[in-house]
Image (cartoon, rainbow, N blue to C red):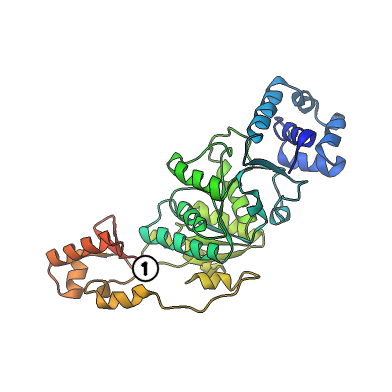
Amino acid sequence: MARGPDLEGWLRLTLTPGLGPAALRALLGRFGLPAQVLDNRQALPPEVSRALDSESVSSAVAGALDWLAQPGRALVTLADAEYPRLLLEIPDPPPVLYCRGRVELLARPSLAVVGSRNATPQGMRDAENFSRAFSAAGITIVSGLAQGVDAAAHRGGLAGGGSTIAVLGTGVDRVYPQSNAALAADIERDGLLLSEFPLGTRALPHHFPRRNRLISGLAQGCLVIEAALASGSLITARTAAEQGRDVFALPGSIHSPLSKGCHELIKSGAKLVESAEDVLAELPGFRAQSRAVPAAANADAAHPLLAHMGADPVGVDSLCARSGMASAQVSAQLLALELAGRVAALPGGLYQKLH
């Protein structure tokens, strides 16, 4: 990781207005390290050359140096051994990565897990359970710290040895959404928070497509769990395919809008996933384990109501017709099952079995 004069040089170049990542990569390719670029500032546009030594840039550099001096914080640059190898393969790797937490996770095998911000309870459970299984196999889970599937994926990653990386669409010193502040603190302690944006950068709409290319670029593959047709998760999946990564999708009910994005991906060539082993079998260095029948599958048959619930959401009236029970009896059993975490109540008076 950059230190001393090199660190200040990287910060000065990346914090100067008018000198974007593509232009900086071209200058580094021509002259070498930041010190050589700064020695050849005559090659820069005059306004950029003047801005390099401006008070605003010097203040931003000083603030970043103070922030980086604190424990657990680092700036990983294109010239560092810690820079992720897979990111070097994408067309537009960021010159620097601001990091909070365990930088060593950048060298681990990783999988992106993304999906809807408005995920169903089953989608959240799938995201957490799949991610926990991947993490237990030594795979680091990469996601975007959004609500819904992202947050569940991070929690699953933290539960295993692979841990998790959260790629932010803000400066790494900010948390967005604020509702995930406690999760971000857990990730900083046991995983890694990462951003290409300068410290203090606010959440702006155009930042998130840029963030998405890093989520897929850091990973060997991308698994999508619940996504509408207009979901940003599909952007991540398509970017992953363009970057040469494997794309996986979890199918769902044909009646659910949150399944349509995954089904579209599968139609376009994404690998259909029913278990964590389906993904592990495709990743180099990981071998699928034998499939076990979930204990819940046997328990369903013994329960008088779960036996009448399929994978799709269902209403009380339909359950009465299927089971022959009275409405009051069905409602009482649904409440007990919901409290036990076996079913989830959905909008519109529907219920869904949780696996």
How many numbered marks have been drawn onto this rendered protein structure? 1
- Farthest-out residue, front: 71
Camera-nearest residue between 196 and 302: 302
Vertical placement of 183 versus 201: above or below? below
322 sits left or right of 230 in the view: left
Query: In the picture, residue 67 is in which quadrant?
Result: top right
Camera-nearest residue between 184 and 26: 184
Vertical placement of 327 versus 50: above or below? below
Residue 89 appears in the rendering: yes
Indicate the quadrant containing the N terminus: top left, top right, bottom left or bottom right.
top right
Q: Amino acid at mark 1?
A: His
Query: In the picture, residue 7 is in which quadrant?
Result: top right
15 sits left or right of 216 in the view: right
Residue 230 appears in the rendering: no
Query: In the picture, residue 282 is in which quadrant?
Result: bottom right
Camera-nearest residue between 351 and 131: 131
> Residue 111, percent across and down?
58, 60
> Residue 233, percent across and down?
52, 54
| Residue ID for mark 1 | 355
| Secondary structure found at label 1 | loop
> Residue 47, percent across and down?
77, 25
Write the residue at 19% across / 74% down.
Answer: 323
> Residue 35, percent across and down?
83, 35
Indicate the quadrant containing the C terminus: top left, top right, bottom left or bottom right.
bottom left
Write the residue at 17% across / 63% down.
Answer: 332
Mark 1, other Cα within 10 Å: few <14 / some 14–19 / many ≥20: some
